[in-house]
Image: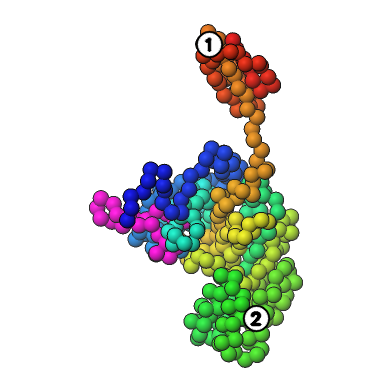
Amino acid sequence: MSKPRGFEKPTGVKDYVPEAVERLRSIEFRVLDCMKRWGYRQIITPTLEFYDTVGVASATTDKKLFKLLDQNGRTLVLRSDMTAPIARVVSSLLKDEPLPLRLCYHSNVFRAFAEEAGKESEFFQTGVELVGDASAEADAEMVALAVAALQAAGIRDFKLAFGHLGFLNGLFEELLPDRPEEQEVLKECLMNRDYVGYRRSLAEIGLPELSSGKLESILQIQGGASALDVARKLTRSAEAQAAVDHLRLMLEVLAAYGMEDYAIIDLTMVGNFSYYTGMIFEGYASGLGFPVVSGGRYDNLLGQFGRPAPATGFALKTNRMLELTADSMGEPERMVIAYRQEKRAAALAKAMELRAAGAFVVETRLLAAEEELPEPGERLIVYG
C-alpha cells in the first residue's frame, strides 16, 4: 500500500473552501434559529461514543461504523447519527427533566461506505428530536417544522412524502401471514424504490390474485385524504387501520398549519433505519435525486438506555443543500480600507465603526511606503 501524498485525503471526506463554509454556516444558523423559535433547545454530543452503548443502539449497520480502540482497549465509534447519542443524554444527564423534551442539533456524522459507492463518509446534519409525545400532533409537528426549516435554509421547491410502517406491517401480515422472509424481500424492494423488483418478487411468491393485486396496488396509492380512503379498503388489519387513522389526523394538523400543500401520502415508505416504529417521511427538492430531509417515529430506542419514552424527529442533510442555496444566499458587500502606517489609528477606527454597524464585511490593507495610493471608490476607502 503506497503512502498517501501530502495533498491527499481519505475516501469519502472533503474540504470546504471559504465560500462553501460561509453558505454552510448560514444554512446552519438560520435553520437552528427556526428550530429555536419552535421551542427546541440545542444540544452537542461527543464525536466519539462507546460501541457497546451508542454504537449498538444506532440504526447504522455494523460494517458502516468507524471503529477504533481507546488506551484501555475499549471499542469506540465515530457517531453515525445523532438520534442514538441524544437518546443516551435524555436517559442520563436529562433524566430528571419532564417530558416532552424538544432538542435540536447541528453536527457532523460518519459512516463508512465502499470506495466505489461514491458516497460521503462525513456529512453534516441539522435536526430535532421530540421525546415524550406519542401523538399524531407530534408527528405532524415534525413534518411542519421540516417545511419551515427547509424554507429557512432558502429552499423553495420541495415536497415531503410521509407514510406509516404500521400500514405496511399490518397489510403484509394479513396477506402474507407467517412468511417473514418474503415480507422482508418486498420491503427491501420498496426501501430501494425498486418497483420492478417488487412486482417480480410478488409474482414469484405466487399469491392468490386478490391478495397479489392488493399488494401491487399500494404502488399507486399517493396523494391526500383520498389516498387514505383507498388504503382503508385494502385491509381489515387493526394495525393498518390505526396507521391510516394516524395519518389522517396528521393531514388535519398540517392543514391547520397551512402546510398541507407540501406533504403527500406515500404508503410504500419503509425507511432505511431499523429503529423506526411508526410514521416516517422524506423530503425531496427540485434538482436533487436524493432526500434533503428524513425522519420518523422511534418509540423503542429510549428504552435501550433505561428511560422508555415515545419519540419522533428528523434530520436535514445540510451539506446536500449547498448547491441548492448557492443562488439564494447572496454575497455580503465588502469594503476595503487601505492606509499608510501614519494613518493606522484613523483607518482601523473606521473599520471597527463599519463592522459594528453590520452593513459590510470590512477588510484592511496596510500600504507600503513606496506604494502608490489607489483611487478611492464606492467600496474602497483610502487613508494616505
Q: What kind of residue is marked 2? A: Glu
Local SS, label 2:
helix
Residue highlighted by disc 1: 370
Rate crowding at label 1 as few (under 14), some (14 to 19) or many (20 or more) other CA atoms within 10 Å: few
Say if mark 1 contacts mark 2, CB within 8 Å. Answer: no
Q: Is residue 346 magenta?
A: no
Q: CA distance from mark 1 to mark 2?
A: 80 Å
x, y percentage for residue 292? 60, 56
Q: Is residue 205 above or below residue 143?
A: below
Q: Which residues are magenta?
A: 60-82
Left of 172 or right of it: where is 43? left
Q: Is residue 165 above or below residue 3?
A: below
Rate crowding at label 2 as few (under 14), some (14 to 19) or many (20 or more) other CA atoms within 10 Å: some
Residue at far left of view: 72
> Can residue 137 be seen from the camera position used here?
no
Q: Is residue 62 magenta?
A: yes
Residue drawn at x 53%, y 46% as measured from the top left = 41
Q: Which image quadrant: the C terminus?
A: top right
Residue highlighted by disc 2: 216
Which marked residue is nearer to the observer: mark 1 or mark 2?
1
| Closer to us: 58 or 174 | 58
Using the rendered view, name the quadrant where residue 235 is placed.
bottom right
